[in-house]
Image: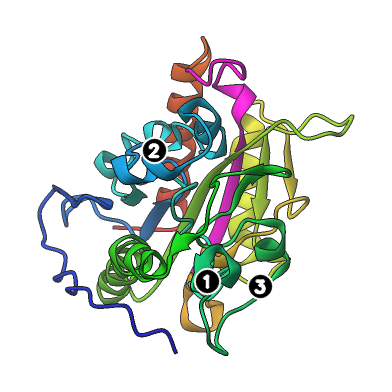
Amino acid sequence: MWQAFNVKKIQKIPCASSVRSSSAVGIHLPTCRNRTPFLLSSPHSGRDYPHDFLQVAALPMDELERMEDRYTDQLLRHMPEKGLSLVQALFPRSFCDVNRDWRELDTSMFSPPLIGNDFIFSKKVQAGYGVIPRCISPGKSIYRYCLPLEEAGRRLSQYWEPYHEALQQTQKTLYQQFGSTILLDIHSMPPLAQTRPCDIVLGNRHGKTCSDELIRTTERLFTEKGYHVQRNVPYSGGYITGRYGKMEQNRQSLQIEINRSCYLNMQTLQPNRHFSKVQQDITNILTELAHSFHSP
């Protein structure tokens, strides 16, 4: 097994409103009085590009940015005030993708190549979208050359591991307080190539990670705001949804994909004129959802 991890454990979350950020992860916590069992994950919204990463990347910044779930963290910025905890990656998805198993590594990206039996050569890895991505899109490689072997361990220990430590510890604390937790993994998606309009895709691994009641209520709240919603197609939930959704343990998870064109100019990747409305809608929907599943 990979032995590169050597990370200080995140301490128990205090009963006070706080923002606890490191260079890798932002943790935004409600006060104990306002806290609900809801935990928000924003794994792909990071915009802090390490200088050494930009030096070795073969692509310009504006192309790397197109791999982001751009500004989903800003859509969620008011949620801790409403009682929902928020964990966000501060680093970009093109640098390290925390919505992958740490073993989903393309061993050939490194020199000398990684050797071991624990690595998972999944379809995502084969396509170039492993935990350390090789491509931003088909045919667009991030690097000109192989990365040093030690770079794999550094990114996993300093970026992947702290993100999952934050999620795990926050979920544990909420579970201890409430006896149940609901994790919402928030993403954005490009407009889908289909005739039927779609603004939101809800994914629960086809019923495996959350109850029908939760996904049905979430769908209703978005629909009432005028959003077109579909379930599990083409996104049914990724690694985070699967890892943190254990219904038999009263730990539910639901992935929410938001169509970027609802709130971004797709050419400039900057907020469009609907951004404030979408942000307010998201705030109202998730607040009502949390109240529906939590009685103080």
Residue 218 pos. (x, y %)? 59, 47
Q: Which residues are magenta?
A: 252-270
| Residue at disc 2, secondary structure | helix
Instruction: Say which of 278 and 292 sits in front.
Output: 278
Q: Which residue is mark 1?
A: 101
Residue under the image location 36 percent in, 62 percent down: 155
Position of 278 relative to 36 (above/below): above
Is residue 225 visible to us here? no
Residue 294 pos. (x, y %)? 38, 58
Residue under the image location 40 percent in, 49 percent down: 291
Gap in angstroms between the C-alphas marked 2 and 3: 26 Å
Is residue 208 visible to us here? yes
Quadrant of residue 128 within the rendered picture: bottom right
- Determine if the magenta segment contains residue 196: no
The image quadrant where one finds the N terminus is: bottom left
Amino acid type for the residue under numbered disc 2: Asp
Instruction: Say which of 111 and 130 sits in front.
Output: 111
Position of 92 relative to 106 (above/below): above
Q: Which residue is mark 2?
A: 73
Going from N to C along the chain, the mark reached first, 2 or 3, is 2
Q: Which residue is mark 3?
A: 208
Amino acid type for the residue under numbered disc 1: Asp
Gap in angstroms between the C-alphas marked 1 and 2: 22 Å
Going from N to C along the chain, the mark reached first, 1 or 2, is 2
Gap in angstroms between the C-alphas marked 1 and 3: 18 Å
Instruction: Say which of 157 and 115 sits in front.
Output: 115
